[in-house]
């Protein structure tokens, strides 16, 4: 029965595919919340299984939305939120995200694959650029580069999503001067908010596979909830460990 909506695989392989999709979603949420680049695991898995890149990209957004909703609920349950600042950042990211989504659905699969490859090379290269040590400061939101940077980040997130967590983290870390914990909290809320209009764009493009999205979302939701709870209890050591894991996984996937 699933053959009509799944790739043409034997029945046993269908079950394995869905199981792999669930666990890739759960792992992606862990990586996304603690660092970024988790969508690379989902897109990589789906594309290796024969899913069109544009379908994988669109379907992944449902999982991202569910993951962010679950994570946001976990943050709120722990009373670790700053919604005023999160909405302010999201307001600037929204126009870029919508434009990026329209750009994504307007290009062909071949060009999309080439752009993914370029993005992966860029992300991989940035992983090995040494970061200057900087003293932690309280968040100052008057930086002239922060909000323009959020527009650019929004466009990238609307277009491809993969690695957008790194870009948001970089903008908030360097232009907002905030701690790792606050940075990760705001990052999750920003992605949650700009993903809503992005999904609407993909919905009208007809690229979302709802069977994949449902299975993926279950894994995303579970991974997000558990990761937020773990990060808040264990502090920045968990965030830093997550960043290391994200880098290793991305390097393995790329090669």
Image (cartoon, rainbow, N blue to C red):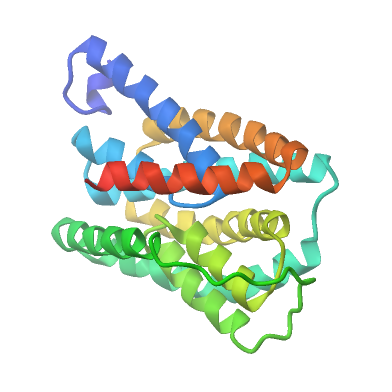
The spot of residue 127 in percent (x, y) is 40, 59
- 252 shown above or below 199: above
- 126 shown above or below 49: below
Q: Residue furthest right?
A: 79
**How many numbered marks are there?**
0
In front of the other: 176 or 12: 176
The spot of residue 204 in percent (x, y) is 38, 55
Task: Name which quarter of the figure residue 160 lies in.
Answer: bottom left
- Asked whether residue 65 is in view, the answer is no
> What residue is at 60 percent from the left and 69 percent from the top?
133
Q: Residue furthest bottom?
A: 144
Q: Residue furthest left?
A: 110
> What residue is at 17 percent from the left and 63 percent from the top?
111
In front of the other: 134 or 32: 134
The spot of residue 88 in percent (x, y) is 71, 72
> What residue is at 18 percent from the left and 61 percent from the top?
114
| 61 relative position to 77: left or right | left
> What residue is at 18 percent from the left and 36 percent from the top?
50
Q: Considering the image in quadrants, where does the N terminus appear?
A: top left
Task: Name which quarter of the figure residue 86 lies in.
Answer: bottom right
- Asked whether residue 89 is in view, the answer is yes
The spot of residue 19 in percent (x, y) is 38, 20
| 174 relative position to 213: left or right | right
| 247 relative position to 221: left or right | left
- 252 shown above or below 163: above
């Amino acid at each position: 029965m699933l053959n009509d909506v799944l790739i043409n695989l034997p029945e046993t392989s269908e079950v394995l595919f869905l199981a792999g999709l669930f666990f890739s979603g759960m792992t992606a949420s862990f990586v996304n919340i603690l660092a970024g680049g988790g969508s690379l695991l989902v897109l990589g898995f789906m594309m290796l299984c024969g899913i069109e890149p544009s379908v994988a990209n669109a379907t992944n957004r449902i999982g991202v939305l569910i993951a962010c909703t679950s994570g946001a609920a976990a943050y709120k349950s722990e009373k670790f939120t700053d919604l005023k600042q999160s909405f302010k950042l999201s307001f600037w990211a929204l126009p870029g995200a919508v434009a990026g989504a329209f750009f994504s659905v307007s290009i062909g699969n071949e060009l999309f694959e080439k752009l993914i490859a370029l993005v992966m090379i860029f992300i991989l290269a940035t992983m090995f650029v040494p970061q200057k040590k900087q003293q932690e400061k309280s968040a100052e939101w008057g930086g002239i580069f922060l909000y323009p940077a959020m527009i650019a980040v929004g466009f990238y997130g609307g277009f491809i999503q993969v690695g957008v967590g790194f870009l948001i983290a970089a903008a908030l870390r360097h232009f907002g001067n905030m701690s790792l914990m606050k940075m990760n909290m705001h990052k999750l809320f920003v992605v949650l908010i700009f993903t809503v209009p992005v999904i609407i764009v993909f919905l009208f493009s007809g690229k979302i596979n709802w069977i994949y999205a449902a299975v993926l979302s279950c894994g995303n939701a579970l991974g997000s909830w558990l990761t937020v709870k773990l990060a808040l209890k264990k502090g920045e050591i968990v965030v830093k460990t997550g960043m290391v894991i994200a880098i290793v996984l991305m390097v393995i996937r790329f090669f």
